[in-house]
Amino acid sequence: MAEETKINILKELTDKLEKERDLTDEEFKLMLESDEPEFVEYLTSKARKVREEYYGKDVYLRGLIEFSNYCKNNCIYCGIRRDNKNVERYRLTEEEILSCADLGYDLGFRTIVLQGGEDMYFSDEIMVSLIKKIKEKHPDIALTLSIGEREKESYRKMFEAGADRYLLRHETADREHYEMLHPAEMSFEHRMNCLKDLKEIGYQVGCGMMLGSPYQKTEHLIKDLRFLKEFEPEMVGVGPFIPHHDTPFASFEAGGLDITIKILAMVRLILPKVLLPATTALGTIDPFGREKGLMAGANVIMPNLSPTDVRGKYLLYDNKICTGDEAAECIRCMAARVEKTGYKVVQTRGDHFGFKKQ
Ligand code: SAM
Ligand code: FES
């Protein structure tokens, strides 16, 4: 196919995706496997236009507290997997978590994210007490949880205690691929059921996948995009896979910048109102990765609020950025970086467009 004809087709497909929020498998495949700069510029400018229709120039900040790196799971790609005996394990105390949340509040964060491995020390009772304490002290924040798979009753108790949102990446929408990334004891069905449970309970839900993960094919990405369209999550977390030297996937290549940028833009066109972070992993594979993500339709940044002495122990992958800076420094740095893109950091909860608190 002549270059010019191909670019025209790709532009038409971009317009079709914007209008219909869907394409045939062949059309998705062509977009996913094309990297002509003129097409990518067209796609990302459409994604910016759509994000600005709903969110203007605003970028929402989420203060991330990585409160435990203990994990009962053994996800093959993950640096803090159970079998990695070289990790120095830590668990923040309730006081430490509360003081991180206070610091975040003082720095202007109006969403706090509690993320950790699946650490059974944090029982429902402990989580409920923690959530209530944070929400009593700071009723105007949104509280997001990212603590993996639990039973529906547990999700419900935490929601009733005041948690607002939940991030649980589906990792891949293809069962066989899921089984290549996880040990046999983990179940694709259970993960997908957890997402359904979270939605039924009333959380604003986030799912998502790693890009360029081992054995990933274009067909898997097409399934991911179809799953996102059908599930309609409020948030989508996508970032490149990056190898960790102490995992069985140590010798695999990291996912690329180009595919991440394209998927961000396509997700924005499929789910125009979605909350879409430019992730730390994206900032790790490219020094301006997060800025490039914002220019491709992302509208959320998640600076780290964890105490500096534990940052270096929550390493999901190698060369993770921002492991040394104080939280105040992170927020200053991010605000300056965001401003250079023409967008601006705002101090609000940053709920999904149209969300009404019950
Ligand atoms: N335990 C919770 C869970 O499973 O959802 C939250 C923590 S888990 C470390 C958060 C996310 O990190 C995972 O969903 C996965 O997509 C991402 N992650 C883990 N290892 C990674 C790697 N090597 N490269 C990029 N992302 C990774
Ligand atoms: Fe549990 Fe990664 S294996 S957080």
Image (cartoon, rainbow, N blue to C red):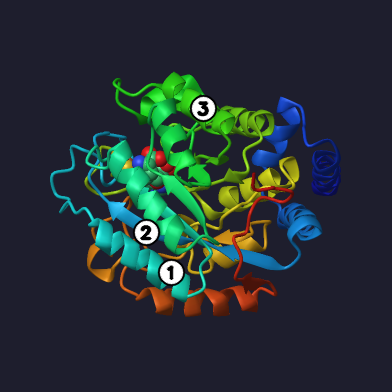
- Residue beneath disc 1: 104
Quarter for ligand 1?
Answer: top left
Compared to residue 311, the image places residue 122 above or below, namely above
**Element at label 3:** helix
Please provide percent x and percent y for residue 52: 77, 61
Please provide percent x and percent y for residue 46: 79, 54
Q: Amino acid at mark 3?
A: Asp
Image quarter of residue 147: top left
Please provide percent x and percent y for residue 160: 48, 40
Please provide percent x and percent y for residue 37: 71, 57
Measure the alpha-carbon separation of dots 2 and 1: 9 Å
Regarding residue 315, the answer to whether it shows in the image is no
Image quarter of residue 127: top left
Q: Nearer the viewer, residue 36 or 169?
A: 169
Q: Amino acid at mark 1?
A: Gly
| Residues at discs 2 and 1 in contact (Cβ within 8 Å) | yes
- Residue beneath disc 3: 197
